């Protein structure tokens, strides 16, 4: 009831919708093996931090990594890597920025001269930009393309999940009182769009006391395992608050950081690749 038959902007999981018909193809010069979305039910949980740090960890392990910054109205990825130069193209293709460790990234902030100018675009224009980032960028060979999603469950999230062949989503949250409800929104959106939920990362979970080294919980006890169990998803990582790391990232030096806390996330991504490979072989 009330259907306008415009499935491209609809989140309903009706039986008449063919989701595969909305998937766009990247250009023939690209080989993108896995696409992983990093998502959250609300803003301010450190989703971009997790995206950038996960890319850093994967690159240090020898994988070819790209970051598609889909948070068009609040882009922050280039800052973490110290990238300021605008992107260029050849009239047909756009060339991504390449970090010192070879991570390829595209962000709207690398296409505008005034970085403080707001991107006041409506949903269809935002969706079109994300499709262009996927189709018209020369990513070349990528093992993992990480998509830094905007917060929430609106137009852009629907565009990513409907238009890109996403292999899985990592959900990020914090140990707040409403974490269950917030995580539920992200999990249910992914399930509605038939996207595999790889698991949950709890950011800003604790900090180490500078005097004794014992953990302190500024937002209360961790709820990672409880919430993961509630939604039958994997509890992947509980990340600390480390001011020194934030200061390093603010300087654009994220690639100098060794970060062991995301090792379980990397293992899940690697196992995802193996499962797909085995399936293709047989």
Image (tube, helix red, strand yellow):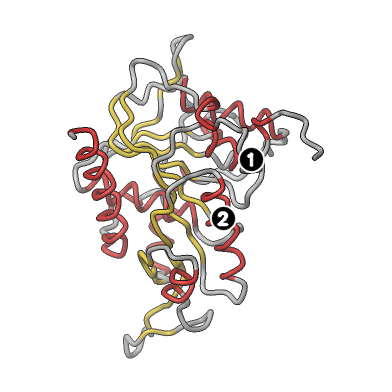
Depicted 281 relative to depicted 241: above or below: above
Q: Residue at x 53, y 39 (%)?
A: 161
Q: Which disc, if any, is residue 188?
A: 2
Mark 2: which secondary structure? helix
Depicted 246 relative to depicted 192: above or below: below
Depicted 166 relative to depicted 46: above or below: above
Q: Quadrant of the N terminus?
A: top right
Q: Residue at x 47, y 77 (%)?
A: 223
Residue 16 image position (x, y, % from top left): 62, 33
Instruction: Tell me where residue 119 sits by quadrant.
Output: top right
Q: Which disc, if any, is residue 238?
A: none
Instruction: State left or right for residue 275 relative to residue 104.
Output: left
Q: Which disc, if any, is residue 14?
A: 1
The reply to whether callout 2 and callout 1 are in contact (CB within 8 Å) is no
Instruction: State left or right for residue 107 relative to residue 1.
Output: left
Q: Residues within 10 Å of mark 2 (few under 14, many from 20)?
A: some
Mark 1: which secondary structure? loop
């Amino acid at each position: 009831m009330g259907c306008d038959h415009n499935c491209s902007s609809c989140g309903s999981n009706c039986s008449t919708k063919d989701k595969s018909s909305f998937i766009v193809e990247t250009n023939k010069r690209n080989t993108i093996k896995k696409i992983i979305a990093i998502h959250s039910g609300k803003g301010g949980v450190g989703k971009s931090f997790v995206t950038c740090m996960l890319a850093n960890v994967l690159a240090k392990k020898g994988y070819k990594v790209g970051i598609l910054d889909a948070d068009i109205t609040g882009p922050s990825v280039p800052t973490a890597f110290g990238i300021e130069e605008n992107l260029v193209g050849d009239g047909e293709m756009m060339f991504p920025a390449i970090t010192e460790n070879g991570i390829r990234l595209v962000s709207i902030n690398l296409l505008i001269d005034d970085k403080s100018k707001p991107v006041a675009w409506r949903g269809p224009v935002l969706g079109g930009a994300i499709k262009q980032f996927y189709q018209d960028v020369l990513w070349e060979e990528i093992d993992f393309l990480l998509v830094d999603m905007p917060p929430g469950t609106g137009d852009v999230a629907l565009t990513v999940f409907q238009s890109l062949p996403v292999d899985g989503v990592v959900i990020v949250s914090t140990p707040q009182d409403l974490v269950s409800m917030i995580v539920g929104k992200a999990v249910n959106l992914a399930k509605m769009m038939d996207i595999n939920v790889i698991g949950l990362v709890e950011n800003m979970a604790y900090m180490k006391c500078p005097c004794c080294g014992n953990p302190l919980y500024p937002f209360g006890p961790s709820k990672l395992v409880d919430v993961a169990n509630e939604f039958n998803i994997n509890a992947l990582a509980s990340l600390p608050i480390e001011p020194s790391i934030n200061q390093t990232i603010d300087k654009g030096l994220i690639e100098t950081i060794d970060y062991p806390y995301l090792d379980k996330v990397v293992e899940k991504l690697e196992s995802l690749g193996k499962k797909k490979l085995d399936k293709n072989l047989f």
